[in-house]
């Protein structure tokens, strides 16, 4: 009897024993979720790769297909259209989309960035010194950019005549060069993406004048895991598993940025690790490290603040007020509060 045959017989005996004891002989297939990120694979997206590479999704009972995004504004469109079951993106474009199309039943099931990342950036040597000075100027951004989509809310609260803004629609990788080359007066986007990207192509922070929306009267929450009410109702275990795994990945990435960058480099071999690590550290300081998150973790969501942001979106786009915070954010799939503590 050869060694291989002996192993084969032992394996057969094990299968027979499993059948007798009532144990499954074949591993059960896990539910699969198609998940869309908000942007390309950069430092701020590495937490999802940490969750995937460390097996957190499988441990939570779900298989996840992670795809890069094209901007937060595309996430609700793709989910509502059925191309993805879940996604990660800025909450405000989802609110706008839901206000326009309430029948889609879009909802956030976890808010992973409590501070607002939206910003408009101009050259520090320009004559644009206040938001009002943007009137008559040209701004460049992708059409699905959340900063562009929510610019009307920023404009309204700051007395800007949005009709006097000229927009240039550009591909994501051309946005920052448009400002550096003076082909646009300003750009919009997540500050965690625009500021370091501008630095990488020759415009240091000292040469940037940044209007953070949150510093000019726009108190939105930021990036959230999104799905539809129907998918969540029909697949509660899968949604709960994705949320739990993503939060574990976020927690690990916050506490160990070097590990997160290793995960990013394994996925994207050409990653500039030093640049993306700096981008991630900046992202943590801007979006995750807030008094609310330090006090109560990612589960510490202020529904009154969320409602103010919803109302602001509706007013900016002249929508009929009808959305309530409880429709937009469903906390039922969050893990225990202690498991959402990042710091």
Image (tube, rainbow, N blue to C red):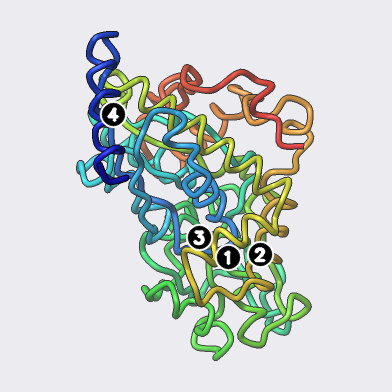
- For residue 99, what is the image quadrant? top left
- For residue 130, what is the image quadrant? bottom right
- Picture residue at 45% right of the left edge, 64% below the top: 40
Q: Are marks 1 and 2 in contact (CB under 8 Å)?
A: yes
Residue 161 badge: 3
Q: Are marks 2 and 3 in contact (CB under 8 Å)?
A: no
Lower position in the chain sequence, tag 3 or tag 1: 3
Q: Secondary structure at mark 4?
A: loop
In front of the other: 41 or 158: 41
- For residue 181, what is the image quadrant? bottom right
Tell us which disc is closer to us: 2 or 3: 2
Lower position in the chain sequence, tag 2 or tag 3: 3
Q: Are marks 4 and 2 in contact (CB under 8 Å)?
A: no
Q: Is residue 277 left or right of residue 223?
A: right
Q: Are marks 3 and 1 in contact (CB under 8 Å)?
A: no
Dot 3 surroundings within 10 Å: few (below 14), some, or many (20 or more)? some
Q: Secondary structure at mark 1?
A: helix
Lower position in the chain sequence, tag 1 or tag 4: 4
Q: Which residue is mark 4?
A: 27
Q: Secondary structure at mark 3?
A: loop
Q: Position of residue 54 (x, y in %)?
A: 53, 45
Q: Which residue is mark 2?
A: 279
| Residue at the farthest bottom position | 181
Q: Is residue 37 left or right of residue 132?
A: left
- Picture residue at 50% right of the left edge, 58% below the top: 147
Lower position in the chain sequence, tag 1 or tag 2: 1
- Picture residue at 57% right of the left edge, 36% below the top: 247
Quadrant location, the N terminus: top left
Dot 1 surroundings within 10 Å: few (below 14), some, or many (20 or more)? many
């Amino acid at each position: 009897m050869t060694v291989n045959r002996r192993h084969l017989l032992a394996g057969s005996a094990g299968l027979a024993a499993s059948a007798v004891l009532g144990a499954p002989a074949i591993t059960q297939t896990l539910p699969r979720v198609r998940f869309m990120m908000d942007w390309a694979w950069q430092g701020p997206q590495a937490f999802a790769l940490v969750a995937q590479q460390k097996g957190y999704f499988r441990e939570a009972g779900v298989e996840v297909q992670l795809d890069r995004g094209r901007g937060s504004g595309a996430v609700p469109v793709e989910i509502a259209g059925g191309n993805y079951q879940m996604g990660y993106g800025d909450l405000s474009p989802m609110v706008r989309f839901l206000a326009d199309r309430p029948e889609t039943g879009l909802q956030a099931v976890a808010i992973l960035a409590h501070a607002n990342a939206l910003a408009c950036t101009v050259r520090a040597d320009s004559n644009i010194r206040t938001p009002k000075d943007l009137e008559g100027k040209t701004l460049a951004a992708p059409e699905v950019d959340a900063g562009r989509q929510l610019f009307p809310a920023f404009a309204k609260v700051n007395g800007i005549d949005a009709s006097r803004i000229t927009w240039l629609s550009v591909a994501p990788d051309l946005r920052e060069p448009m400002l550096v080359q003076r082909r646009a007066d300003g750009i919009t986007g997540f500050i965690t993406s625009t500021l370091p990207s501008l630095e990488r192509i020759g415009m240091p922070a000292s040469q940037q004048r940044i209007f953070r929306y949150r510093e000019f009267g726009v108190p939105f929450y930021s990036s959230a895991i999104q799905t539809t009410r129907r998918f969540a109702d029909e697949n509660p275990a899968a949604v709960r598993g994705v949320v739990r795994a993503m939060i574990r990945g976020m927690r690990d990435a916050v506490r160990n940025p070097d590990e997160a960058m290793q995960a990013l480099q394994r996925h994207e071999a050409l990653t500039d690790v030093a640049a993306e690590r700096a981008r991630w550290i900046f992202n943590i300081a801007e979006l995750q490290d807030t008094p609310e998150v330090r006090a109560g973790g990612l589960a510490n969501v202020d529904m009154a603040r969320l409602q103010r942001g919803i109302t602001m979106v509706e007013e900016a786009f002249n929508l009929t007020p009808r959305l309530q915070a409880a429709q937009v954010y469903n906390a039922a799939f969050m893990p225990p509060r202690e498991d959402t503590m990042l710091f």
